[in-house]
Amino acid sequence: MFHGWRVVTACCVIATVAWALGTFGASVYLQAVTAAHGWPIADVAFAVTLFYLVSALVQRSVGRAIDRWGPRPVMLLGAVSMMLGVAGIGQVAARWQLYPCFMLIGLGWATLSTTGIAAAVAPWFERHQGRSMALAIMGASIGAIVGVPTLQFAIRQLGLGEGLAVVAVAAAALLLPLIARVLRFRGPQEIGLQRDGGATLAEAAPLPIKPIATAANRPLLLWSAAPAFALGLAMQIGFITHHVTLAEPLLGTVGAGLLVSATGGSGFAGRLILARIVDRTNVRRLACLVMIAQAAALLSLALWPTVPVLIVASLVYGYGIGHITTLGPIVVRREFGAAAFGATYGTAASVIQLTSAFGPAVIGVLRDSFGGYRPGLAIAAAVTLAACAIMFAGGRLAVRT
């Protein structure tokens, strides 16, 4: 087997753990911490926002570090940081103590999520660039399926402190040897191969769609994709973080956890479909269509907050999660090529993470201000449509430049 596919498999496992304990785990931490200590939802949501802010500030550095030193040392450091943060959440006794815990998770998230995974996979593929990234980040959906029930079960059986400690130790035992073993090479050239496994340049199949970035349109491409994904993911992360709390009044704690898992399953299906079509699809147009579907799901929840609508809208929104999280690096890779991908996407990811970091806090503040989630969901739908417009307009203008 070409080692690049082993890298994809390892990154899929890394993504599973990262999203289980990061993005989707945040909804469990929000519910469990507020229930255990009686602290306001908005206060805990601000701590979750800090996790994304810290991640945003180091995204560019992560991309550059992987370009220079390879993924292994960067991801090993990130895995240790994330596990320390997760274990620490269960030990807090005051609200301020949440902040260093979520800062550690943020450092880990920056290395183990989209930027780190995309930078690790990008050097290995040319003709399968989209498929390889989609399959690697598919672990995010697996993390959504298994993460919330696993965390809830551990907390229910062992308590908040011991439960999170056991989960963190188990995750470290899985990730550290995997990263050390599989991610020891920076690219195929280190083992005498070209991208896609070709032994010579002639055996490396040409890219189906050539990069379109030029000196003239490069800023427009980058600064339309980055803000569009930033706004879309801000609303997406806000929804994911509050999903358990939003669904609990209608479905109960167990039912809410099952719905989050089903939403992750929908995202998994979305990524499977994406992996099959992405290398022959206009990825900007696809991102716009998915954003429109997500906006419709959010608006439906705002207008008709019933059990059937909650379930259907969550599944539709989850399908979009499987696309939007993955399409960001694919758009950059498609339009800019493989050269210095880590630094290029790291720049975009800094903007994306910095903006999306405010998603949990914004939804939390709107919920507390209006006494419910419905107005916040309607606003989130409008913001998602604005992201779609930026994505579409930027692509059209760049082609004409």
Image: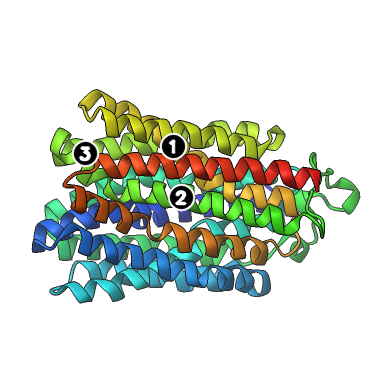
Q: Residue at x 57, y 39 (%)?
A: 287
Q: Earlier in the sequence, mark 3 or mark 1?
A: 3
Q: Residue at x 76, y 61 (%)?
A: 339
Mark 3: which amino acid? Ala
Distance in Å between CA atoms under marks 2 and 1: 14 Å
Q: Earlier in the sequence, mark 2 or mark 3?
A: 2
Q: Earlier in the sequence, mark 2 or mark 1?
A: 2
Mark 2: which amino acid? Leu
CB contact under 8 Å: marks 3 and 1? no
Rendering coords of residue 132 (x, y %) = 63, 45
Q: Nearer the viewer, mark 2 or mark 1?
A: 2
Marks counted in the figure total 3
Mark 1: which amino acid? Gly
Left or right for 85, reference 223: left
Q: Quadrant of residue 95?
A: bottom left
Distance in Å between CA atoms under marks 3 and 1: 18 Å
Residue behind mark 1: 267
Q: Residue at x 20, y 47 (%)?
A: 370
At mark 1, the secondary structure is helix
* Label placed on residue 233: 2
At mark 3, the secondary structure is helix
At mark 2, the secondary structure is helix
Residue 247 in view: yes
From what the image shows, is residue 311 above or below residue 123? above
The front one of 70 and 247 is 247
Residue behind mark 3: 247
* Label placed on residue 9: none
